Amino acid sequence: MSDILTSILAVGVVLGFMILIHEFGHYAVAKLLGVRVEQFAIGFGKRLIGFRKGETDYRINAIPLGGYVKMSGENPMDERTNDPAEFMNHPRWHRFLIAIAGPAMNIMLAIGLWTVVYAVHFEYPIFWDKPAVIMGVKHDSPAAAAGLQAQDRIVRVADISNPTWEQVYYKVWLSPNQPLDLTVQRGDQTFDRTIKPIAVTESQIGSAGWYADESVVVGNLEKNMPAAKAGIKEDDKILAMNGKPLPSIEKMIEGLQETKDKPVELTVQRDGKIMQFTVQPVLADSESVNEKRYRIGFSNSPEMKVSRLPLGQAFERSLEKNRKDSLMILELVEKLVQRKVSLKTVSGPIGIAQQAGEAVQEKGWMPIISLTAAISLNLGIFNLLPIPILDGGVILLLFVESIMRRDISLRIKERIYQAAFVFLVIFAVMVIYNDLAKTLPGFMQRLP
């Protein structure tokens, strides 16, 4: 129950802050350009608390699902007057600046937060920025079907040359059941291959079935499971199983399914010392694959690398990361529209709450700051999509009207907004449904 309350509180703070920043962008530019702002609201529905200052009612409403800035005369269906403070009486370029200000604030916040992370304490898996050298291939996987082997190096994935493992994994995750072109180097030979990643986990992300050199480090131990009973501790690094090196957690999981309930010998490094443990796997629930499998009971926590950059370099690194992440978000949207990626890959409020709760429980402020930056960028990009009601839709209609040199008729606008509203409601219901489907059964990924 405490974890649920922590998640609710965390997501409330994070999303509330995102909404506040977004709406402040609209508010500040509207006030700067002389548009009357009647309400600055967090949430929808009935007013709970607030205060009035000047012409604006600052309020918190009953339904905490967003927020809005209500400007005089902004609804095209409202009766128009000659009041110069009304939104629709301002030139289109004013309305464009007001519309784009909200998403721009979210994107600038993401850039600022990632700059802080890079300058203070940036932590990421050690293997993430290494060249994509395959350490092993899972049996009956797309990688095995393509003839890939250990020590092969991926020198091109899709349109990316000399990719890191981070870039490879992102491409694979976004290509479930879709052909993905590779160029592979094996010794002195280079050859092309096409793989078709399979969809895995409740989120239906792509998996190629190869292993990176990411190491196996014990994260959360499950009570009353074999690893804990045998004396394994958190932060232990498992070097080998039955004398065979373990380059990744996937290799360990695959090995446990082969040995089944037979005891396995684990070679463990703890505080610089090498230790041996005998552990007997048990057949236990594994909800990531919706079936029981042989497990010893811990989650993997790959070795992490910590870096700090000077402020100027941190800002440049933040700009580059946000550029790459923006392109990845747009690629995801494109594949969603093309139905190449399942809607299950998108997290709604429940999924975000789960991630926020996990981030809050991690050590330090960096995890929650990183998550806030990611959500802020996603919110900014999503609001720029050309969907009426969203800021991007307003910008699109302004662009069309600029080309036409006249306003679109109120009747047509009304129909457009009605259709967009229905679309967004259906989209929200589907995302929340998928969140429930993924969360209620629970879901443990990568648990040996």
Image (cartoon, helix red, strand yellow):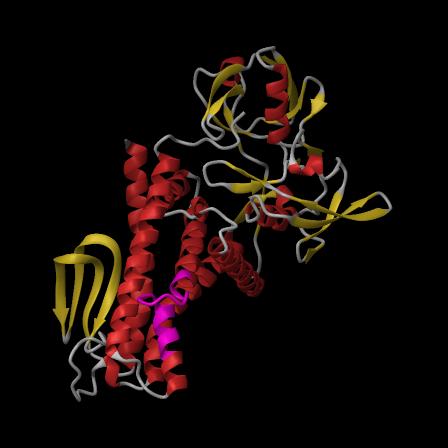
Q: Position of residue 236 (x, y in %)?
A: 57, 26
- Above or below residue 411? Residue 382 is above
| Image quadrant occupied by the N terminus | top left
Q: Position of residue 344 (x, y in %)?
A: 43, 44
Residue 146 visible, this orientation: yes
Q: Position of residue 126 (x, y in %)?
A: 62, 42
Q: Measuring 61% from the left and 42% from the top, which residue is drawn there?
A: 197
Q: Measuring 25% from the left and 71% from the top, which residue is drawn there?
A: 414
Name, please, the residue furthest toward the right: 188
Q: Measuring 34% from the left and 43% from the top, which residue is drawn there?
A: 353
Q: Is residue 104 magenta?
A: no
Residue toward you, 116 or 6: 6
Q: Measuring 45% from the left and 28% from the top, which residue is drawn there?
A: 287
Residue toward you, 422 or 122: 422
Residue 268 visible, this orientation: no
- Above or below residue 291? Residue 357 is below
Total numbered labels placed on residues in the image: 0
Q: Which residues are magenta?
A: 382-398
| Image quadrant occupied by the C terminus | top right
Q: Position of residue 326 (x, y in %)?
A: 50, 60
User: In the picture provided, is 191 more to the left or to the right than 410?
Assistant: right
User: In the picture provided, is 193 more to the left or to the right than 11?
Assistant: right
Q: Is residue 392 magenta?
A: yes
Quadrant of residue 375 in the image? bottom left
